[in-house]
Amino acid sequence: MDIEIKIERNIMYDYLIIGNGIAGLSATEEIRKKDPQGKILIVSEEKPSTYWRTRLSDLISKDFTDDEIFVKKEPWYNERKIEERLSTKVERIDPEKRIAYLAGGEEIEFKKALIATGARAFVPPITNIDSKGVFAIRTVDDLRSFKEYVANKKEIVVIGGGILGLEAAFSAKKLGLEITVIESFDYLLARQLDRELSEKLEKNLNELGIKTITGKNTAEILTKDGAVCGVKLADGTDLSADAIMVQAGVRSNIKIAQDSGLETDRGVVVNDHLETAHEGIFAAGDCAQIGQFTIGLWTSSQEMGKIAGHNMTGDSESYKQPKPFSTLMLGDIKLFSAGMNSGEGIEEERIEKEDKIYKLFKKEDSYVGGILWGDIMYQNDVKNIVFNGKALEETKLGTEIFGK
């Protein structure tokens, strides 16, 4: 009696994309433009397709559907013959055999791979930080869990007074919650603002009903019956809280790379072409490290994804690290910051018109930074002056504001 044995062989994919954040999606889009026939597979641990992660803070105060937050909606994927495997974990890859090992034992063969696993929220080692009622919003699932939990709550503490923390605080305030922001630096947005404008920002936030505490560290999450009831600061001060939101930055997701024998540091180490030391294995987005830097910005991840996609199809483009700039818009609060605003030998040039403030920071003969308060329409001029060395008098900021 003959027994027929069937062996299911997986498809060989030309391009395997691990992670479906904006870096993974951007790479996929560029690959398909340059290679209309190659087989592409996106594998992601997240449940939904790629969504606008940059909107999560704003959506704290809004109702939404999955369809509203997708970057690309069906039939975009089907029309381009791009396969997705969602809620699926890649444990590791073998860079030499070109095999990806999934949780559950399945194996996938590929020719080239992109690691675009992004980053996770950094949760500082505070006593009781794992208690019920502590949230770090990084995914849409995190957001929904937070909104459900605070539906009948009153007081929220936000640990972290950076841009994301302030955006989240402002949005949560719209739910009618009492908000307190705790920032360990001496003043808010210490990397983006000088002390004068930071104090002005803090005053504006306080007038909106958002309490702020600066120069203080959180020592302990206070709990009752296993759930959050407050925080204790390092100076012994107790604050009551029904829930806590942690906005203390991110850390790159590098476990897959580590388990695959790829070089890692803070991120997955790549060259200027976003390729690892293993030919054909690339990394892009929040998980990638170029030189000594991981970047962690949506726009940077998008650009890295595009370049990685081009290079996976045979190009040899280099990624140039972006210059640092920030924008914050909270109701009537509008500010833009680029470059440096403090340090030895830095001098300030300042114009104030009504409640609008324009600052440029100069070291020797060059402008090294700028801040706009209340009127950010000149932000491209600031970037050109600070990053590209454009003469102030050749910009509208120079002629219309500084009278050059």
Image (cartoon, rainbow, N blue to C red):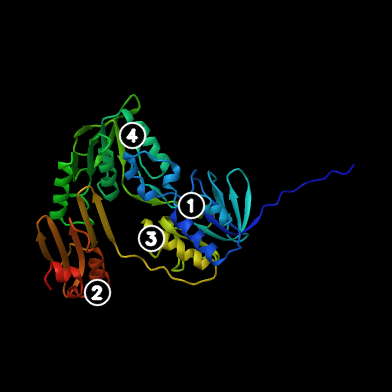
Tell me the number on the disc at residue 128. 4
- At x 26%, y 66%, the residue is 380
Q: Tag 4 or tag 3, which sits nearer the N-term?
A: 4
In the rendered view of the protein, which quadrant contains the N terminus?
top right
Element carrying mark 2: loop
Q: Tag 1 or tag 4, which sits nearer the N-term?
A: 1
Q: Quadrant of residue 3?
A: top right
In the image, residue 265 lies at what x, y percent?
A: 42, 58
- Residue 69 in view, yes or no: yes
Q: Tag 2 or tag 3, which sits nearer the N-term?
A: 3
Element carrying mark 1: loop
Separation (CA) of disc 4 from disc 1: 32 Å
Amino acid type at circle 2 is Gly
Query: Who is closer to the viewer here, 150 or 353?
Result: 353
How many C-alpha atoms fall within 10 Å of the one at disc 2: few (<14), some, or many (≥20)? few
Find disc 2 in the rendering and name its residue: 389
Separation (CA) of disc 2 from disc 1: 37 Å
Element carrying mark 3: helix
* Pointer 4 with pointer 1, Cβ within 8 A: no
Amino acid type at circle 4 is Asn
Find disc 1 in the rendering and name its residue: 20
Amino acid type at circle 3 is Ser
Amino acid type at circle 1 is Asn
Tell me the number on the disc at residue 259. none
How many C-alpha atoms fall within 10 Å of the one at disc 3: few (<14), some, or many (≥20)? many
